[in-house]
Image (cartoon, coloured by chain):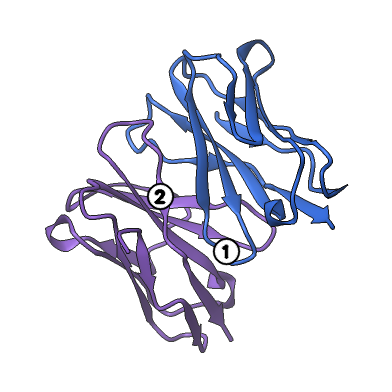
Amino acid sequence: AQKVTQAQTEISVVEKEDVTLDCVYETRDTTYYLFWYKQPPSGELVFLIRRNSFDEQNEISGRYSWNFQKSTSSFNFTITASQVVDSAVYFCALSEAGAGANNLFFGTGTRLTVIP
Amino acid sequence: DTGVSQNPRHKITKRGQNVTFRCDPISEHNRLYWYRQTLGQGPEFLTYFQNEAQLEKSRLLSDRFSAERPKGSFSTLEIQRTEQGDSAMYLCASSLLAGGFEQFFGPGTRLTVL
C-alpha cells in the first residue's frame, strides 16, 4: 500500500533562515514519481517538482533544493534564505506507475510560516 | 489564462440539495482528475478520466456522486442529496496522458453544506 508521511505539521522560521521539509514515502512499485506542491493561502495547489524513482540526483532551483534518497525512502525539500512569500502549506505526493490512474497520494502537508 | 479553471469557486447549499461543479482542464491534457480536500488534510483522489472515459473511481466516491466528461473536454461533478460530511474543497487537475506527468490543479470549489 502507498503512503506519504509528512511528520512536521507546522514549522515557523524567521526570514532568511533555511528550512527543510521532510517527506517519507512507502510504495511497492519499483517505478514511481514523487512530487512537491505548494498551497498558498489563496488555496490553489502549485506544482514545484517531479522526480522519478530512477533519478536520485538532487536538484536545485533557485532557493529551492530537493534531496531524494531511495535508501531511506525520503524526498526532502529545503528552502534557502526563506522569504515571507514562502509561507504556505507544502504537500509531498506519490504517484505509482503501475496503477492505471497514476493519481497522486498526498501527505497531510507541512504548514510553513516565515516570520518577517 | 490557459490553466485549469473551476466554477463556481464557492457553493453554499442546504442538506439534501443537489450541486454540480464544473472543471475546464488545460486544453491539450488528456487526463482529468477530481480530488477532495478537507481541512488540515491533503487532497484525496476521487476519480479520473482519460479523454471522455471514466476509468477509475475511489471508494470515497459514493453513489450520490457522479462525474462526466462529455467529448473529453470539460468535466462536471454532481453530488446528489448533499450531506454535511460533503463539505470540502473539490479540486480538479489535468495532465498529459503518460504516467508520471505532473498534474496541474485548478483553484477548487469550496462546498459548504448547511
Residue for point 53% across, 71% down:
B86
- Quarter holding residue B77: bottom left
Residue A99, placed above or below residue A83: above
**Image location of residue A8, percent across then percent down:** 79, 41
Q: In the rendered structure, the residue with mark 2 lies on which chain?
A: B
Q: Colour of chain B?
A: purple
Residue A43 is labelled as: 1
Tell me: B52 left or right of A68: left
**Image location of residue A108, percent across then percent down:** 67, 47
Residue for point 47% across, 13% down:
A54
What is the crowding at mark 2: few (fewer than 14 residues within 10 Å), some, or many (at least 20)?
Answer: many
Q: Give the SS element for disc 1.
A: loop
**Image location of residue A102, percent across then percent down:** 38, 35
The one nearer the camera, B36 or A71, is: A71
Which chain is represented by blue in the image?
A
- Quarter holding residue A4: top right
- Quarter holding residue B76: bottom left
Quadrant of the snapshot with the N terminus of chain A: top right
Tell me: A73 left or right of B37: right
Residue for point 47% across, 66% down:
B108
Q: How many marks?
A: 2
Q: Amino acid at mark 1?
A: Gly
**Image location of residue B5, percent across then percent down:** 36, 66
Q: Residue furthest top?
A: A71
Q: CA distance from mark 1 to mark 2?
A: 13 Å
Q: Residue furthest left?
A: B71
Tell me: A87 left or right of A101: right
Q: Which residue is mark 2?
A: B104
